[in-house]
Amino acid sequence: MEATGSFGGGKQNQIECGDIVLWKKLGEKRNIGMVYDIYVVQMGGRSVKKASVASFQDTLHYELLLLELKIVTKGN
């Protein structure tokens, strides 16, 4: 079986720049922010979709896998 596309590629069609998203890391409180960039990186020999997110909670910027994000509100 041949794999095509990238890891997290299915979420790319759902999440767009300007969307408000929610995420939670293990052992941390949930965070909310806005997606301002979606891009592909090579990790472990495969393409992985990631997003740059500006947090509303702590004003930091995060680089997250698309699979970690849950849409709260669509940006458009």
Image (cartoon, rainbow, N blue to C red):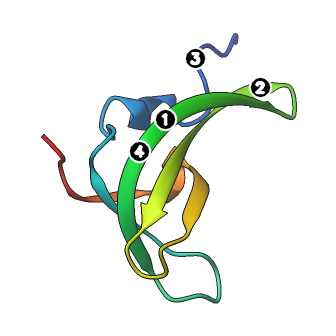
| Amino acid at dot 3 | Gly
The local secondary structure at tag 1 comes to strand
Disc 4 versus disc 2: nearer the observer: 4
Q: Is mark 4 on a helix, strand or loop?
A: strand
Circles 1 and 3: CB atoms closer than 8 Å: no
Instruction: Quickly name the residue at label 3.
Output: 5
Question: Between marks 4 and 2, how big is the CA–CA gap?
Answer: 23 Å
For the residues marked 4 and 1, what is the alpha-carbon distance in whole angstroms? 7 Å
Residue neighbourhood size for the residue with mark 1, other residues' Cα within 10 Å, grouped as few (<14), some (14–19), many (≥20): some
Marks 2/1: CA distance?
16 Å
Image spot of residue 61 (x, y percent):
56, 62
Image quarter in which the N terminus is found: top right
Q: Which amino acid does label 4 sit on?
A: Tyr
Q: Residue at x 47, y 55 (%)?
A: 53
The residue that label 2 is drawn on is: 46
Left-right relation of 50 to 30: right
> Rounded to the nearest whole Å, what is the CA distance between mark 1 and mark 3?
15 Å
The residue lying furthest to the right in this view is 44
SS class of the residue under badge 3?
loop
- What residue is pinned by disc 1? 38
Res. 36 mark: 4
Determine contact: label 2, label 1, CB under 8 Å.
Answer: no
